Image (cartoon, rainbow, N blue to C red):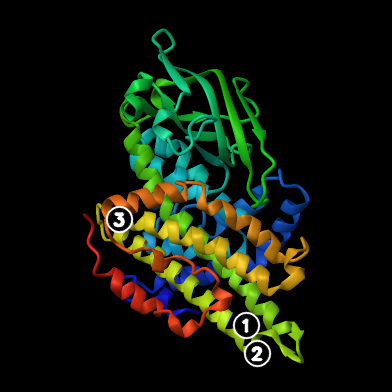
Amino acid sequence: MSAIYANDTASGITDERPDEFALLTRDFVLREFPQYLQAAQRDPHHYPRELMKKCAEIGLLGLEIPEEYGGNAVPSGQQVAVMEELARGDGGLGLDILVQNSLTAFPITQFGTDAQRARYLPRMAAGEMIACFGLTEPNTGSDAKAIRCKATWDEGRKGWIVNGTKRFITSASAASVMVLAARTGRPEERGRGISVLLTEIGPGVESVTVSDFDKLGQPGSQLCEVVFQNHFVPEDALMGKRNQGWQIIESTLQHSRIWIAAQGSGIARHAMDEAEKYTHEREQFGKKLADIPDVRNHLQIMQRQVEIARLLVRKAAAHEQAGDERFFVWASLAKLVAGETALWTAQEAMLLHGGMGYMKEMPIAQIFADAAVIRIYEGAAHIQAKIIGKYLPGKEILPLLPPSGAFLRDARDFPSPAAVMADIETWTIA
């Protein structure tokens, strides 16, 4: 077990509980994930409800929910340690658990009314209710403030009539409640004309149609399109104030970005696991691949990059846990680096597998497909780079990113992860 779990001064996390919870999660993942992953690979549109119930039993669905509502809320440092282990087991199944926590339970806990929290959180923590987060639309991805899905106030019915389409909504096919961002003001008002509604969806709601996409990776989770046609949402479903919902959306994304970064570092660790395993089993030139100096050097460079990503994730979590109002800058940095690291490590691990790495039967092929989307969702790499450039102007972030041509480089030419983090500690946010 890496020291950064239990007492890592570079990340600022010294609580030993993350180590215990992460170990518990790791044991759970090794025991339970394989059968559900196999089922997902056979039928990518199957939602793992049984797994979610088992997750609830050990508290994995209540990491954002206070005890009074049936959860076991833990600080950010513990959340990322657990999320990394979930994604290390499988990126898609880990994403199902992430959405139930950081994208839905978090905003309901932080911004919902007492009645809303009492109505939804206990069932979410118990795995009885699956939730989803409705923001992205066909014409609004990174430009989220331009959403068009409209909620029109109906004075007679005392509620909203929702019309529009949400796209790329994780878990929507299994969900019975959505944290919905809707246009309640004029389009030109952008973020100032958005409200957040808690609306119930599902097979019995005729005004809502849900369909699944066929995606490249992460078969353990579903990505959906949700169409609202004259869908009624009662007045008491409003979260926060009318036309002031962007704060809720922005706070949720900034918080969840750390979870996604942990997903990236977890997938990178999974790729690293497979690279280590294969190179210690495969023989070439009369010896194990891992005993060939060039391969061993390559593995060392890969491990260094994964460690940098993990430390950045924990730094972001530590800043949030400490109440730093600018934690979101470190979250963007962690998300950017972890996303790039996940895909790069999977690619390098595939290379070390040789021709077998390109075969679907090998785990690394699935990991490669799973890793690609980390750079895209919850703020694409370009958006994260823009945030970092604004708040950390002039800082050189290229040394934090995966090196090109790693198999041609010497591991001794790179500064250690500790040295990299020591340099970052001198940075101040503008």
- The residue tagged with tag 1: helix, strand or loop? helix
Q: Residue 290's image quarter? A: bottom right
Residue identified by numbered label 3? 327
The mark found on residue 291 in the picture is 2
Residue 199 picture location, percent across and down: 49, 29
Viewer-proximal residue among 141 and 122 = 141
Residues at marks 2 and 3, CA–CA distance in whole angstroms: 42 Å
The mark found on residue 169 in the picture is none
For the image, the number of numbered tags is 3
Q: Residue 294's image quarter? A: bottom right
Q: Is residue 289 left or right of residue 332?
A: right
- The residue tagged with tag 2: helix, strand or loop? helix
Give the amino acid type for the residue marked by disc 1 in the picture: Val
- The residue tagged with tag 3: helix, strand or loop? helix
Viewer-proximal residue among 185 and 37 = 185
Residues at marks 2 and 1, CA–CA distance in whole angstroms: 7 Å
Viewer-proximal residue among 148 and 112 = 148
Residue 337 picture location, percent across and down: 44, 61
Number of the front mark, 2 or 3: 2
On the question of residue 195 being in view, the answer is yes
**Crowd rating for badge 2 (residues with CA inside 10 Å; few <14, some 14–19, many 20+):** some
Residue identified by numbered label 1? 295
Give the amino acid type for the residue marked by disc 3 in the picture: Phe
On the question of residue 328 being in view, the answer is no
Q: Is residue 193 above or below residue 293?
A: above
Instruction: Name which residue lies at 67% across and 38% down.
Output: 213
Tell me which numbered mark, 2 or 3, is placed earlier along the sequence.
Answer: 2
Instruction: Name which residue lies at 35% across and 38% down.
Output: 248
Give the amino acid type for the residue marked by disc 2 in the picture: Asp
Image quarter of the C terminus:
bottom left
